[in-house]
Image: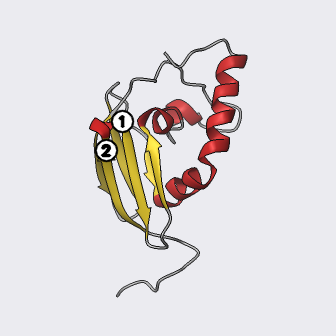
Amino acid sequence: MTEAYDPDKPWPTELRLKDKGKLLAVTFDNGESYEFSAEFLRVESPSAEVKGHGPGQEVTVAGKRNVSILSLEPVGNYAAKLFFSDNHSTGLYAWSSLLTMGRTRDEMWQAYLGKLEAEGKSRN
């Protein structure tokens, strides 16, 4: 049985690594498409290492300017697992999360840069 198309839940039609793993391009079936830097995806990883196990346990990850994505693989029919050059591979990037990240990328990035500065940390 095939699920009915739901316009409120866009589905990725393509995930492509570009620029030697420095970028991940994601295209959705509603026409939206986004390019994410590997650094952005690494510092915003949905893993417990970054997000913690509950509110207030988030960690600001620094020093990932030169990280790249070595590979990716699908997880079921709902997410992708990314393998980064710093050996991080524990976050599962759900399709809905990638869509939200694409739609709010600029705000998320500015918030991240603000946290780095506030904590005296660097992207290098």
Residue at label 1? Answer: 22
- Outermost residue toward the front in this view: 19
Residue at 31% across, 56% down: 74
Q: Which amino acid, by three-letter code, is at mark 1?
A: Lys
- Left/right of residue 113 with respect to residue 80 in the rendered view: right
Q: Percent x, y for residue 111?
A: 69, 34
Residue at 67% across, 43% down: 107
For the residues marked 1 and 2, what is the alpha-carbon distance in whole angstroms? 6 Å
Quarter occupied by the N terminus = bottom left
- Left/right of residue 108 with respect to residue 95 in the rendered view: right
Q: Percent x, y for residue 21?
A: 31, 38
Residue at 50% across, 65% down: 32
Q: How are the residues colored?
A: secondary structure
Q: Percent x, y for residue 122?
A: 57, 15
- Residues marked 1 and 2 touching at CB (< 8 Å): yes
Crowdedness near tag 1: few (<14), some (14–19) or many (≥20) residues, C-alpha within 10 Å:
some
Residue at label 2? Answer: 18
